[in-house]
Amino acid sequence: MESYKGPILVEDDEGSRFHVHEYERRRMLRRYYRYMLDTGEAVRPLDGKTFEIQNTGEILARVDEE
């Protein structure tokens, strides 16, 4: 079963902001994560602060909310 973990605020090089939505699925003792933009496009985490849109290769940076 998959559960919604929450949104992550990100922005592109031009400063446009989007939300990446994080989902978690558990199988046995392993956890699998899936990430999607508001637009439905799949993204993958590169590290703790950046994501890549899988179809275009565009990089999105995490925005630290204050």
Image (cartoon, grey):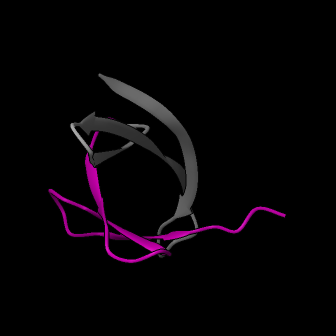
Residue at 51 percent across and 38 percent down: it is 5
Region rendered in magenta: 40-66
- In the image, 37: left or right of 31? right
Residue at 21 percent across and 69 percent down: it is 57
Instruction: Kindly give the residue lying farthest to the top in the view shown.
Output: 1
Q: Height in image: 54 above or below 22?
A: below
Image quarter of the N terminus: top left
**x and y, in percent, of residue 38 in the image:** 43, 38
**x and y, in percent, of residue 13 in the image:** 47, 76
Instruction: Kindly give the residue lying farthest to the left in the view shown.
Output: 55
* Quadrant housing residue 53: bottom left
Q: Height in image: 1 above or below 31?
A: above
Observer-nearest residue: 48 or 53?
A: 48
- In the image, 15: left or right of 13? right
Q: Report if residue 43 lies within the magenta region.
A: yes
Image quarter of the C terminus: bottom right
